[in-house]
Amino acid sequence: LLWIALMATPSPSAAAHRMGHFDTTRYAALLRAHTRAGTIGGVQVVAVDYGALASQAGDPESLYRRVLADFARFDPATLRSRAAKQAFWMNAYNIGAIKLVVDHYPVDSITSRKINLLGSPWKKDVLQVGGKVRSLDGIEHGILLGEFKDLRTHWAIVCASVSCPSLRREPFEPERLDAQLAEQGRDFWNDPRKGARMDRQGNRLEVTRIHKFFREQFEEWGGGIAKVMEPYVAKPADRAWLARGGWKLETFDYDWSLNDTRRLD
């Protein structure tokens, strides 16, 4: 019955396309049906059922293939607002990362040599959008960071790995984007295994390797790691400790292993 309901999901209307609105109905159904919250090695994740999606990949009438078709036929140039553009490309990145894994499944990591011999999948063309095939690198650096220069991108897009921010189990939507990104930020920066861990006795702040990868952006766009984190940190005492400074900054190891439902604890 669930599958029948999903397959009955209406296609995006021509009117919606003319108005510059991307219909996320089917993408939302895919996220509900094929993701699950849990832990992998004790780390909180939203895992993806890549095996189920891979089984659909050969069927053009499957939900998975219809979602890809929605992105392929939509023209992002019709989007007018900044929020609509950001939401669309964040969703495009996330389904693109899922597709990159599904295309080569089974793999144990998005950095698998099955995907790229050099272990670097980011420049590999993967997702067709509006008649043009995009890479994850092109979406992230060329559009989301290159055009919008929004640090919140870093806790919105998910590279199919355990140490990434958790995949949101609903699409990003323009009308709710700020609230959705705020929730993503709170979840990520308050997670001591993924975002940040404050050792106040040892006077150490350990943070995600994403900060090391993009340190210049954190400094130039956000005023440094403490100011970036501060709006999301739950405890007032921790916010005060961050603001005082003087702590030693260290970086977590990054777990690139796959956020696969088959690996859930």
Image (cartoon, helix red, strand yellow):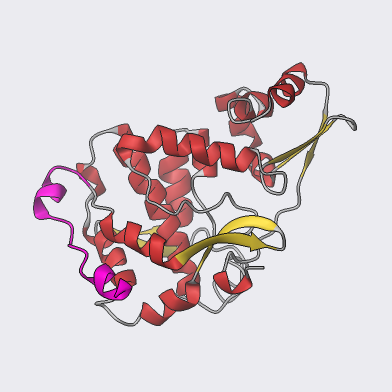
Quadrant in the rendering for residue 237: top right
Note whether residue 132 is visible: no
Percent x, y for residue 127? 37, 62
Q: Is residue 232 above or below residue 5?
A: above
260 vs 125, left or right, is: right
**View extreme (front): residue:** 1
Q: Is residue 11 magenta?
A: yes
Q: Is residue 59 above or below residue 85?
A: below
Q: Quick one: 249 or 25, which is closer to the camera?
A: 25
Q: Is residue 125 magenta?
A: no
**View extreme (left): residue:** 15
Quadrant in the rendering for residue 70: bottom left
Quadrant in the rendering for residue 25: bottom left
Percent x, y for residue 166? 55, 52
The residues colored magenta run 1-21
Percent x, y for residue 79? 23, 41
Note whether residue 231 is visible: yes
Q: Is residue 232 above or below residue 258?
A: above
41 vs 56, left or right, is: right
What residue is shown at x 57% (from left), y 69% (from top)?
260
Q: How many marks?
A: 0
Q: Quick one: 56 or 137, which is closer to the camera?
A: 56
Q: Which quarter shows the N terminus? A: bottom left
Q: Which quarter shows the C terminus? A: bottom right
**View extreme (right): residue:** 202
Percent x, y for residue 165? 57, 49
What residue is shown at x 33% (from left), y 47% (from top)?
88
208 vs 205, left or right, is: left
